Every structure is written in C-alpha cells, then in structure tokens.
Image: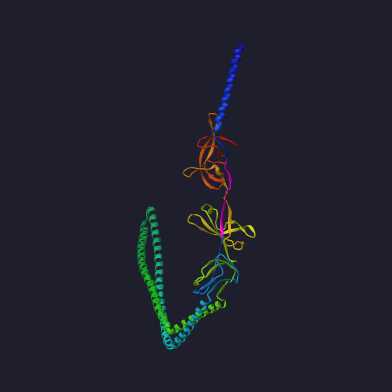
Amino acid sequence: MDKKRRAVIAGFIIFLLVMGVCSLVTKGIYTAKLPQVSITVPREMSLYHPVSASGAVETGQEYGVYTPAGLRVASLAVQKGDSFREGEPLFQLDIEDLEHILAGKKLELQRQAYQQREAESQGTESRQEGTRTLARAQEDYESARKSGELEMSRAREDFIRAQSVLDGLSRELDRARKELDQARKELEGQETAQGMSVSGGDGGAQDLSALRQQIGELESQVRQCQTQVTSQEQVVIAAAKAAEDAQLAHEDRLQAAWRSVEDAWASASGSYRAAADLAKLEQAYLQEEIRELEELLEAEGWIYARESGKITRLCVDVGQRTPDTAGLLYTPDDGLRTLAARLTREQAKYVSVGTRMQMGFETVSGGKQSREGVVGYMEPQEDGGVLLWLDVTGEGMELGQQVTLQSTWQSDNYSMVIPLSALHQDGNGNFYVYTLRQQNGILGVEWHASVLYVEVLDRNSRYAAIESVSLSEETQIILTSTGELKDNAVVRIVE
C-alpha cells in the first residue's frame, strides 16, 4: 500500500514537472515571436540644421575698353578668359582704314569752317531786329506780371475780409446758443421748484413767463444768426473761388507773355546765328575725333590696357568694325569679387542676409584654404530656392574658383525631442509615434504599443521636435522594432 501511494505521488510530481516545462516552452515560443523593441524618452535639446552648397566666384564689377565706332579690327591679342597686365596690347585697328577715315574727318572740318563764316556774315541785321522785338516782349511780360499780382492781391483781401466776417458771425451764433441753453436750464429748474412748492404765488408765475419770453427771443436770435452764417459761408466760398480764378488767369497771362519772350529771344538769336553756333559745336566735335584718330595712328592702331585684369567678354572680331559700345569687357585684378551659390527651398529657411558661412576652396599654390564670409544678398527663385551672393574681394580667389559653403543653424531649445527613427508618417501626411503601455495578458503583464499622433515642430536628419498633450518627459516611445508594429500590438522590450 505504501508503495502504491508513493508511486501516485511520484507520478503527480512528474506530471507537474512536465506541465511546468511545457508552460515554460510555450511562454518562450510566444515571447520569441513578439517584436523586439528598443525605447527612448523625449528630452530637451536644440536642433542643428547644417547647410551646404557649392558656388563659383564671379566678377563684382566689369569695365569696358572703348574705341571710336566704325573702325575695322585688324587683329586680336587676347581671348575671353585671358589675363593681362597694364600696358599690354589688347587688339589692333586697321592702319589704312584709320588713314582713310581721318582724311574724311579733316575734309568735313574745313567744310564746317566755311559754313560758319557764311552764317556769321548774314546774321547781323536779323539780330538787331530780334533784339527790339525781345525788349518789347519783356516789357509786356513785366506789365502782365504786375497787373496779375494786383488782381490776385485784391481777390485775397476780399477772401480774408469775408472769412473774418464769417468768424465773427460764428462766434455770435455760439454765444447765442450758450445763452439759450442757460435760459432753458434756468426755466427747467424754476418749473421744478414751483411744482414742489405748495403755493407758488403770482411772483413765481411772472418769473416763468419772463423766462419763456426770453427763451423765445433767444431762439429767434439763434435762427437769425444761423441764417447770417449760412449766407456768409456762401460769400466766403465765392471769394475763395474768385481768388483761385484770379490765380489761374494770372498764370495763363504770364505763360502767354513768356512764350512771346521765348519767341522773341529765338528771333533775336537769329537762324543764321544758330547755324553759326551749331557749326562751332560740330567743329569742336570733329577736332576731338581727329585727335583720337591721330593718337591711334601714332600707336599703329594698337589698343593697350590701362590696368591689369582679366577678359570676361569680347565684343569685336577680326575684320569687323568697332561698335559704339565697348570693344571688350574685363574685370580688374583688384576689382570686386562675389561668390554666387544656390540653396534649395529647405536650406533657404536657415540662411538670411548677414549669415556667416565657412568657405572652402583649393588653390594651386596654397592647397586647401578656408575663409569665413557673410551673406550680402539673397534673391528668391520660382521653385522656392534662393540665389545668394557673398563678397569675397581680397580673399585670394580667382574668377571661376569653385567654393564650398557650409554653415549650421541652431534652433531654440525644444522640450520634446526624439530620434527621427521613432517618428512615423501615415498616408495622409500626419505624423505619429508608438508609445508603450502595460496590460494584463495570457502570460501576465504585457507591453502593448499604442499609436499617438503628434505635431512636428522641427526636425533635421537625426532628430525631431514634437508636441502633443499626451506626451510627458517619462513617456516611453518605441525607437526601433524587429517586426512590423500596429496599434495595440504586444511587444518585448530589449535593452
């Protein structure tokens, strides 16, 4: 019997052990299938936004090399992009073409001299007649000015007098209105006092009658004053209009008289005299052109550089004639230099005029170089990006130099910042995170993932600043997961 009992007890113990092992195996299998997650909590920090772009050095100012227009180019000593020193030849003009044009200019100068002498000999009588006409026109102008000023003065005086009368009537009207208001208040007070008295007597009734009669006279006086003010206002308006009409009439008469003076002056100058003066101007212009052509011939047609620089554009070619604009454009060696670069729409939010940026570039002699520059100008583009320029004059950069720009923008402190890998976005563009909550399950207390929608205040390539009324500094947020997460999914936390 004892053996049988011991066997039963041993079997029960073995059964319990087998069941325990099975439970552990089942729980291990269940737990192993759960997504393994790592967690984080929001923290307070600033976000850094790096900005980088590449640009090229451009000229900040260009100058032109000019020659007289219409001269044939014989040869070019430089090309676009070439550097040159002060005094070096740039291009040469055709000598024979210069000589031919110079001879034509000298012939034209002689013709102008003959025309000038002829015009001067024919203009004496015409100038005398014009002088008399001019004197009369000036007298008429002076007479019109004096008479017009007299009429305007009288009109202004009439307006001032009318305005003064209106001001006096307005004051009289105000005084009468005040007396009327005072009398009405006094009548109201006496009527109230008499009504409260047991027996007013004949004296009180007589006082009320006298006050009512006075109020009637004052009301008549106010109406009369109002009528006078209205009438005088019309007089003032008429006087102001008369003064304005006098001013306009005076200006019209003066304009007509001045035109007569101008016509008389033109007549006094005389067409022959004008022709003679014009001939003098043309001669002076021709003499300057001849001087320039002779200087070019002395230099054998060569155009030399006045300072050191670099060619940015050629506007002439061999066999063509020089334009009336610059023959070539260049930027001086000691001129302004600007660095132009383009930023995307996202980068443009973190750069403004005055932002300091690190400029990295390489030189043949100095190797890698670094400078600090300041954004001086920004120009918005249609796609939302911006073009920015920095002044790099004196930084040792050549035209066309490729430069890398870098800067970092630091935000204010945010109270809720999480790694970017913990932030998710749905199909509608809304952002959310997975938070953890404890809940009883088949194996006891379990961790469940919950979806929490948040507002993203700022973010960079590593972190995001978020906001939600359900967030706190202790909220556990899922950072990574070995499996796909869903709302209310059971997960396993790993360190």
Q: Position of residue 425 (x, y in %)?
A: 50, 43
Q: Going by the picture, which residue comes out furthest to the top? A: 1
Above or below, comparing residue 163 to residue 430 in the picture: below
Residues 216 and 453: in front is 453
Above or below, comparing residue 191 to residue 487 in the picture: below
Residue 3 in view of the camera: yes
* Quarter of the figure with the C terminus: top right
- Which residue lies at the image location 58% right of the left edge and 65% below the top edge? 336
Q: Position of residue 304 (x, y in %)?
A: 57, 72
Residues 169 and 289: in front is 289
Residue 281 in view of the camera: no
- Which residue lies at the image location 60% right of the left edge and 15% below the top edge? 7
* Quarter of the figure with the N terminus: top right
Above or below, comparing residue 195 to residue 236 in the picture: above
Along the horizontal axis of the image, is 280 left or right of 364? Answer: left
Along the horizontal axis of the image, is 79 left or right of 205? Answer: right
Residues 83 and 49: in front is 83
- Which residue lies at the image location 58% right of the left edge and 25% below the top edge? 21
- The stretch drawn in magenta includes residue 1: no
- The stretch drawn in magenta includes residue 46: yes
Q: Position of residue 346 (x, y in %)?
A: 52, 52
Q: What secondary structure characterizes most of the magenta part? A: strand
Above or below, comparing residue 408 to residue 115 in the picture: above
- In the image, the segment drawn in magenta is 41-56
